[in-house]
Amino acid sequence: MQVRFALSTSISGKGISMRVKSNKALRRSARLARRASVSAVAALPAQASILRRPGLRLGAANSIAAAVAGILWGSGGAAYAQQPAPAGGEPAEALQEVVVTASATGVKKLDASYNIVAVDAEQIKEANPKSTADILKVSPGIWPESSGGQTGANIEIAGIPGGGDAPYFTNMIEGMPLYGMPSLSFMDSSSLFRLDNTIQRVEVVQGGPGAVFGPGQMGATANFLLRRGTAEPSGEAGVTYGNEHLIRVDGFYGFPVIPGWLASVGGFYRSSDGVRSPQFKADEGGQITATLTHDLDGGSLMFWARGLDDKNQFIVPVPVIQSGSDSFGAYPGFDPLTGSYGSHAIQHVTIPNPGGGFEGADLANGRGGQLYYFGIKWDQKFGDWSALNNFLFDGGHLNTNALFSGPNPRPLSYYLNGCSAAQPAGYCNAGAPVDSNNLSFTLNPGAAGTPADPFQVYSANASAVSAVTCDNNNKNCKITHPTPAIAAAYAGAGGAVPLSQSVIRQGWWYIQKQLQSFVDEFRVSKTIFEGNTVTGGVYLARYSDDDNWSLGNGMLMTNTPNATGVALNTVIGGTPYNVTSPQGIVDSNGNYNILAHGNATNIAGFLSDSWKVNQWIFDASARVENIDVHQRTCNRTSTQMLTASDLWANAVPLCNGTWDFEDYKTTKPSFTGGANYEFASNMSAYVRANTGVHFNDFDNNVRGANGKFAPTQTITNYEIGFKFQNAMAYLDVSAYKKQFTGLQYTPSDPNGNPLAGQTAIYGADSKGIDFIGSMTPIEHFTVRIVGDYMDGTYSDYHGCLKYTDILGNLVACASPNGAPLQRQPKFQVRITPSYTQPFPWGDVTGWVTYEHAGQRYEDIVGGQPLGSYYMLGAGLVATFQKNWELRVQGTNLTNEIGLTEGNARKLGAATGLGNVLLARPIEGREISFTAQYKF
């Protein structure tokens, strides 16, 4: 379960959550909010806009419900008539706020019979997100893992078994998805842009009508709405300094162009060494966004464009020591909070290009992006008719230069010689290595592999020369030899490496990805009669992906922060051999090297009807979507790339000029229906049911399928919710039950090669409660809580899942049935008390955030516990007069060790010899200071 906390305007105590026409209006409304007396619902100090989540069961007769409503409402003052969200400088009431995501024409949160959270620009800052994905913590059912850096986050939706990447989450800007598929390998949609001052607000929807409108995401959708131009020139400029040597400059400027036309431009640039410093810049780059808007008679027209050029370190797991299932400590010499394998010594490498030859790669380029966007949004009202057309064209490069973990670290002597040399206690059993992930190479990969011409294999796990051994039918015959004497030297620097040195083999992966996407949605609504509106629409997406992957490239390096490569050389039969490249690449022969191209078209039609009858609002919607995918991947042949003496690259799989073609096409429907009952203008309850689908993508279940495509994944979701707000409290609670079918799991080896014939297909069942609440017991003081409890397990797997464990042993059988959903906490909560002190010259707001994440498991069989942890954050914001704002914020102030990921390429227990586990803890203490001038 998860519970996440909502840092909102509530933190600042300003009680504002709506669009504003200028920063001056924002400042004016903030002052008004501070000075206003507490009355009715309007004073819900701020948690308002964030604290919004679906609810608990309300099973009372109308007469009883009315009585309860009267009692509850009485504590807040006189009732008020329903009105649209306020503009200008008036404070906004949370439940009266209009939201536009996953809705036909926009709806008040009070009337929304689904799970939606909305936060504005100030609330985003106060949440202090470490990445774009991290802001999703304001929605209690979403678990974003941001420990991997600015990009590449794993995003889990409560009760929906993702297990990595972000397949069930879609990011949108101005209502448009940034790519036609929600996720690809090495691409989650949160990596496609960065947060900055050009964002006015974000709305996060889970399930419900989100499965019908727009891209039809059955999991969760975040819609980021841009700040627009202002009638009077206004804006801000700010500088941020962080203790990780972060320097960031942000700016925004809104201005009129000609009468009726408003424009804005803004963005950021930053440079940071990172909390986990890799000796080069961990984050470097920026983003710029511009808008041009025109008010029409009964509508509006908006043009927007954005450019991103950013480089971000992708953080690989580091070694920790595990004690039991819920306790983790530092590995000797490696700080789990600040350590990084990245270094100048391993920054630049030369590796095989799948198309032939070698190419250079630079770890400093990380998992960044060079992307462009251009969008047009038009909406118009014609009497009882209204129309909306939304268009987005984008593309660019999203490359990854990163280390990926493999087997656990070990002494160099063990890696080179196994048990032929003396080893620490517990490393050998009856003269054989307990952990068999040691050095192995083939001297003659071009041999026939027959009894007469066997492969000559040298392995640290062998203690003597073996007889010829063959697989069935006398294939893959080999003779295994103990490893010869091998010289180990520090790559580049030279000098012998001591045999006692702890070393590790990490994959140095280089992924080149070029994306292009064209998306358009047109919808039209008609008021049939008073209270009843019908909406119909068409959604079209046309997109492509060109990939060049060099996965594998196992590099032997010192198991130390800021590692150094280890180069190996030997002599066999008087002939010298390079066991590794000069940089320490020990194996490119097992690579997963591919060139691939995919293009696809999604066409969907949807129809929705909303009917208001007195205090009831009923809605029903249906969607039918067709996906048509064409994908090709090169076939490969093992190739000797250098000389026969270069053992690390004597059988590299390279594209051979032939292709595997896949054509995937299917059509599926989705449905949703809900009912909302408004007890009063500050309280409502709802029920909803929906179905949803998730199609296969280029990288998952299309590539290499040989026409045998996995079934479409489906979900059935039931939800009941309750929302209440008065002068003292805010409550938004929901309960859900989700049934999921069509899950697929295909294990891969450390080089990223999918293991053929081992795909598991199964389902999952879950139930849970989401909760957002706040209390303002005294003026200026607010306590907020956001939480989620989720009880989910895998089900309906039939068969036996084989896998290789962390020690290199084949495990005969495992089943995910009954195991908890991968990487999702059963319980999570965020609690934030905040206090605002007004002064004649401005105000000061301080807050502390306590976050608890419960036990999680890395793998689908529940063998890798990640433990529970807490994290403490805090912030202080001071405003001076109309122009200046000073802010200091910090995360993980107590330097807690909390794991978000284990060894992702291992099934079952991943703790090896010495209780060592490769895992990715949250980063250590990070503190930043911002000075901003508004005008």
Image: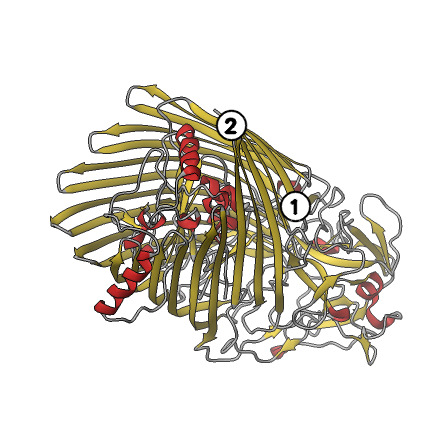
Q: Nearer the viewer, residue 252 or 391?
A: 252
- Residue at disc 2, secondary structure: loop
Write down the residue under mark 1: 926
In the drawing, what numbered circle is on residue 881?
Answer: 2
Q: Residue 121 at x, y = what percent? A: 45, 40
Left or right of 505, for residue 499: right
Query: Can residue 373 be seen from the camera position used here?
Result: no
Q: CA distance from mark 2 to mark 1?
A: 29 Å
Q: Is residue 384 above or below residue 859?
A: above
In the rendered image, the residue lying farthest to the left is 529
Residue at x 51%, y 41% (from the top left corner): 125
Q: Residue 368 at x, y = what percent? A: 56, 42
Left or right of 840, for residue 338: right
Left or right of 439, for residue 607: left
Q: Nearer the viewer, residue 890 or 367?
A: 890
Q: Residue 496 at x, y = what percent? A: 89, 52
Q: Is residue 627 above or below residue 65?
A: above
Judge the density around disc 2: few (<14), some (14-19), many (≥20) Cα neighbours within 10 Å: few
Q: Residue 678 at x, y = what percent? A: 25, 58
The quadrant holding residue 473 is: bottom right
Residue at x 19%, y 45% (from the top left corner): 524
- Residue at disc 1, secondary structure: strand
Q: Disc 2 or disc 1, which is closer to the eye?
A: 2
Q: Badges 2 and 1: C-beta atoms under 8 Å apart?
A: no
- The amino acid marked with disc number 2 is Gln
Labels 2 and 1: the sequence-earlier one: 2
Q: Is residue 772 above or below residue 271?
A: below
Q: Nearer the viewer, residue 540 or 165?
A: 165
Judge the density around disc 1: few (<14), some (14-19), many (≥20) Cα neighbours within 10 Å: some
